[in-house]
Image: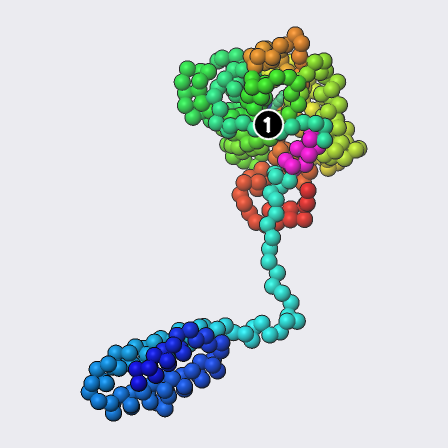
Amino acid sequence: MLEIIKQYHQEIKDIHLQNIDELEHYRVKYLSKKGIISGLFEKFRAASAEEKRSIGKPLNELKKEAEEIHLHFKEIFDAQKNIDFKTFNDLSLPGEGFETGARHPISLVRKQIIDIFHGLGFVIAEGPEIEDDWHNFSALNFPEEHPARDMQDTFFIEKKNGKDDIALRTHTSSVQVRLMQNGKPPFRAIMPGRVYRNETISARAHCFFHQVEGMYVDKQVSFADLKQTLYFFVQEMFGADTKVRFRASYFPFTEPSAEMDISCTICKGKGCNLCKNSGWVEILGCGMIDPNVLKNCGIDSETYTGFAFGMGIERITNLKYQIKDLRLFSENDIRFLKQFNHEIV
Ligand code: PHE
């Protein structure tokens, strides 16, 4: 009898049941009242005391194993049964739509700006958002204690002795300094990045915004190069019929300095609310890099000249998409962001 028990043990050990019918067949064959294992127990009861001693344990093990196998496959098939296959039946039902993410308008416009300058051979340069005073101000010809520093309301992180003060950068001009200090001319680069200024948050101002600044330093770079570069940018960004004008201005790091306006993107120069009836809107600051800045960064200002410019990405985005409230850019309101789903660049 021991041999028979071993045989059945072997038989069920690696059994693999495929479906619920096979499971039932297995149950009837081994575990039902008239099944193999019950039959063996009947024989066991009739066996001699000596035989009982040798087959009792293996017989119980066979029963236990047979039950465990049954339970194992039952659990698998029960779980499958709970999936409601009915819901999959009607393949003609329309599918459930799902929403895709989209680029943020600031990212869209940043990419457009970068692409335009990339076409002119400008590379991208990046630098830290936490800067020391020297890179953000002193190297850029902001005299110490000079009111020019108040032009950009600075968030100071650590006040030390002036030039080592630590602040959140107020413009990405600091990256220009880093680039010039660490390399050799010619330089032709743009610096996209986030900048911080201590302003009261309103529809027209925020405590942080995004800039793309640019610079070109080489032998014989002139104001004419600056004008033509920016004119090309405006035509690519806002359309070939957009006009530009330069107004004299002041920045400590450029001489001469200018601000550039474009003909109003809404009224095309006729006069409207956006341009306060002037027909023009300001988009950027620019100028020829002050020789002092070149010297501060270790560039020979007798041999090299350069131009620089800087614009706010929010401003360009406002003009392109007529967004009237700056706060929308950082509130993550899905209704606002969704409007840019179709914009592909
Ligand atoms: N750094 C200036 C600003 O943030 C912009 C600028 C850059 C102006 C380069 C002139 C030249 O306002």
Extent of the magenta region: 109-118
**Residue at 44% across, 15% down:** 162
Which residue is nearer to you in this view: 303 or 156? 303
- What color scheme is it? rainbow
Where is mark 1, residue-wise?
125
Which residue is nearer to you in this view: 314 or 221? 221
Which residue is nearer to you in this view: 194 or 218? 218
Residue 97 at x, y percent in the picture? 61, 60
Where is the N terminus found, in terms of image quarters? Answer: bottom left
Magenta span includes 99: no
Ligand 1 visible in quadrant: top right
Where is the C terminus found, in terms of image quarters? Answer: top right
Q: Is residue 17 left or right of residue 35?
A: right
Q: Is residue 303 left or right of residue 178?
A: right
**Residue at 45% across, 84% down:** 25
Q: Is residue 72 left or right of residue 19?
A: left
**Within the image, what quadrant is residue 299 found in?**
top right
Magenta span includes 116: yes
